[in-house]
Image (cartoon, helix red, strand yellow):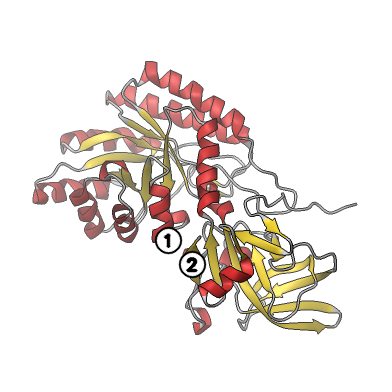
Amino acid sequence: MTPPIHAPMTSFAVCGDDLMVGGVTLAQLAVRVGRTPFYAYDRAALSARVEALRTRLPAAISLHYAIKANPMPALVCHMARLVDGLDVASGQELRVALDAGMDAAEISFAGPAKTATELAQAVAAGILLNCESMREIELLAQIGHELGLRPRVALRVNPDFELKSSGMKMGGGPKQFGIDAELTPQALARVRELDLGFEGFHIFSGSQNLRPQAIIEAQQKAYALAHKLAVESDVDISVLNLGGGLGIPYFPGEQSLDLAPVGENLAELVERARQDMPRARLVIELGRYLVGESGIYVCRVIDRKVSRGQVFLVTDGGLHHHLSASGNFGQVIRKNYPAAIGNRMQSDQREIASVVGPLCTPLDLLADRMELPCARAGDLVVIFQSGAYGASASPQGFLSHPAVVEVLV
């Protein structure tokens, strides 16, 4: 039986033996960057992803980029010109979003442990705060009074359902995220008592899903929950953030998400909202889906070793730069990200090899017994699907190797 293979990697062109990034060969880019390892993000691929998504979404849907997926300032500046809003999860991300030139009115802030300083920063900036607890509601009233400003708030609701088959479940059951749906009316009453600027709801039930029907079901349930809460508490909604959940293919056997039914469902929800909540703007908040396939991680083969018949390509990169690809960022059973030898893309001399890094741990594994072009010292290993949760989600201080470089090409 033939083992399943990775979905085709189509975001990057190939010219001869060379992978191309932003119209530049990988070998030339490596010289330009000055050293390996590095992450490279392709501007054209980022723009094309947003454009393709727009063709599938109804025009009335607001598209937000969740900076936590990739907070590189140059990339955020590029994305800010393509999307309708930015979502942040820390004070530092808020500064990046504001520096990117996004209108403060279109920036929102979510996260379960916002400090008083971060809340004050957000109120002073005039952005929308997704409140996740009664503590935040009380603090915001105090901060608003001290600053002479009326905080803009939405309630992040922990629903009584989850996004089925999602990579990470962000709602349903006991969660540190948001206010439980059954406690939301009490929170809404307190928001009204404190005269905070209530605008709507944020309902994020899960992420990294490749099943259209599961995404559709979660969006429909989120809409129904928001409408029910609005009616029962007699509040007017101007924004409803339905979260994200759209996934990308990482592992053998996975295929790209079919967007058509998701877009059709959102169009139906837009029409329902015109009747049920005529002032409400529907938002989807995406991170990985917008940037994940537009980035690669590049490291250089330092040594080629054969141990008891197994080939090891020992590189200058590893889990300290790319924890996700090593399998140590949420994988239950380790699977390989798609990988290549970026300067031998067309080579027909192939072998089974493992790509490992410089760290003194067997966990430092970027590819486990993959079929790759035969490589030697000096060649460039490429890990695809690396535009999201890469550098910023990795323990770069581990064993004190140099930090990874990031470039937008």
Q: Quick one: which residue is furthest to the right in this view?
A: 1
User: Is there CB contact under 8 Å for labels 1 and 2?
Assistant: yes
Q: Toward which corner of the image does residue 362 lie, by quadrant?
A: bottom right
Q: Quick one: which residue is furthest to the top in this view?
A: 275
Query: Which of the two residues, 17 or 235, is positioned nearer the viewer here?
Result: 17
Residue appearing at x 27%, y 59% in the figure = 115
Q: Distance between the residues labelled 1 and 2?
A: 8 Å
Residue 104, x across and y down, in percent: 26, 45
Residue 240, x across and y down, in percent: 37, 33
Q: In this view, does 386 lie to the left or right of 172?
A: right
Residue appearing at x 54%, y 70% in the figure = 38
Question: Is there any visible trace of residue 131 in the rendered image?
Answer: no
Residue 116, x across and y down, in percent: 22, 57
Q: Which of marks 1 and 2 is nearer the N terminus?
A: 1
Q: Is residue 305 left or right of residue 63?
A: right
Question: Is there any visible trace of residue 103 in the rendered image?
Answer: yes
Which mark, by number, is residue 72?
A: 1
Which mark, by number, is residue 273?
A: none
Residue appearing at x 50%, y 24% in the figure = 267
Eyeballing the image, is 157 above or below 366? above
Query: Which of the two residues, 44 or 71, is positioned nearer the viewer here?
Result: 44
The residue carrying mark 2 is: 406
Q: Toward which corner of the image does residue 209 lie, by quadrant?
A: top right
Q: In this view, does 111 lie to the left or right of 374?
A: left
Local crowd size for mark 1, using a 10 Å CA cut-off: few (<14), some (14–19), many (≥20): some
Amino acid type, label 1: Met
Amino acid type, label 2: Glu
Query: Which of the two residues, 145 or 88, is positioned nearer the viewer here?
Result: 88
For the residue labelled by badge 2, is the local secondary structure a helix, a strand or a loop? strand
For the residue labelled by badge 1, is the local secondary structure a helix, a strand or a loop? loop
Residue 399, x across and y down, in percent: 52, 83
Q: Toward which corner of the image does residue 323 lie, by quadrant?
A: bottom right
